[in-house]
Image: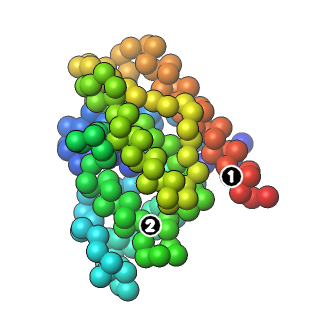
C-alpha cells in the first residue's frame, strides 16, 4: 500500500490554539496510509512581490516543505469571519511568484474548530475560495465544522467524545481516499 505524505498547516499562531489540539487529534486518527507532518509558517515575513526575484531562505524552505508532500490539510480557526492573517500570508508566499504556485494540482482539505456553534464555516468557505484560485483540488465532502468544548481534545490529541472521534476518523479516511483519487487521476 502506498503511504502518502500529508503536510498540515495549523492556521493559528497561538501556542494554546484549539486548532493545534485538533491537528494532534487528526494525526492520531489518520489511517496508516497517511504520514502527517506539520508545515510551520510562523517565521515567514509579510509577503511582498519585492521578494519574488530572490525569496529569503525561510520562504524557500517553506515552499520546499510543501513540494515534499503529496497533499495539504488546513486546520484553521476563524478570525473576524475569515482565515487568520498569518495563514493567508503563508498561502501568498506558497503561491508566488507567478508560475511557481506550490498548491497547483496538490490535493487539499480544510477543517477547523471554534467554540462557536458553526465551527469555522465562514473561514473554511473563504479558504476554499483561495485554494480554488490556487488550483488545488479540494475535498468538498466531508465538511467538518467542529464546535470545541473544554476537554474535547487533550494535549496529546485524545478525543474524549467517541462520536466526535469517529467523525474525525472518518474525515481522515475520506481524505485518504480523496488523495488516492486525485493522485490516480493526475497520473493518467
Q: In terms of image quadrants, where is residue 130?
A: bottom left
Q: Identify the residue position indicated by label 2 in the image.
A: 95
Residue 66 in view in this figure:
yes
Residue 29 versus residue 95 in the image, above or below: above
Residue 178 at x, y percent in the picture? 63, 41
> How many other residues sit within 10 Å of disc 2, few (<14), some (14-19) or many (≥20)?
many
Q: Nearer the viewer, residue 59 or 95?
A: 95
Left or right of residue 183: residue 67 = left
Label at residue 183:
1
Element at label 1 = helix
Residue 155 at x, y percent in the picture? 28, 30
Give the residue drawn at x 42%, y 41%. 125
* Residue lying furthest top: 162
Give the residue drawn at x 45%, y 50%. 129
* Residue lying furthest bottom: 53
Q: In terms of image quadrants, where is residue 149?
A: top left
Chosen colour scheme: rainbow
Element at label 2 = helix
Q: Nearer the viewer, residue 136 or 62?
A: 136
The answer to which of marks 1 and 2 sits earlier in the sequence is 2
Residue 63 at x, y percent in the picture? 43, 67
Left or right of residue 57: residue 132 = right
Q: Which quadrant of the figure contains the N terminus?
A: top right
How many marks on residues? 2
**Badge nearest the viewer, 1 or 2:** 2
Q: Which quadrant of the figure contains the C terminus?
A: bottom right
Amino acid at each position: 500500500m502506498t503511504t502518502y505524505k500529508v503536510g498540515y498547516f495549523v492556521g493559528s499562531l497561538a501556542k494554546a490554539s484549539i486548532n493545534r489540539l485538533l491537528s494532534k487529534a487528526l494525526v492520531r486518527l489518520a489511517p496508516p496510509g497517511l504520514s502527517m507532518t506539520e508545515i510551520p509558517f510562523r517565521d515567514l515575513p509579510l509577503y511582498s512581490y519585492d521578494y519574488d526575484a530572490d525569496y529569503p531562505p525561510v520562504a524557500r524552505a517553506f515552499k520546499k516543505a510543501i513540494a515534499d508532500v503529496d497533499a495539504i490539510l488546513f486546520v484553521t480557526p476563524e478570525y473576524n469571519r475569515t482565515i487568520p492573517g498569518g495563514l493567508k500570508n503563508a498561502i501568498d508566499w506558497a503561491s508566488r511568484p507567478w508560475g511557481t504556485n506550490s498548491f497547483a494540482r496538490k490535493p487539499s482539505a480544510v477543517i477547523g474548530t471554534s467554540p462557536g456553534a458553526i465551527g469555522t464555516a465562514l473561514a473554511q468557505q473563504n479558504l476554499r475560495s483561495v485554494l480554488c484560485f490556487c488550483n488545488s483540488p479540494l475535498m468538498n465532502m466531508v465538511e467538518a465544522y467542529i464546535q470545541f468544548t473544554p476537554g474535547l481534545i487533550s494535549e496529546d490529541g485524545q478525543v474524549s467524545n467517541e462520536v466526535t472521534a469517529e467523525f474525525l476518523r472518518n474525515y481522515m479516511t475520506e481524505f485518504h481516499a480523496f488523495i488516492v483519487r486525485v493522485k490516480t487521476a493526475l497520473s493518467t
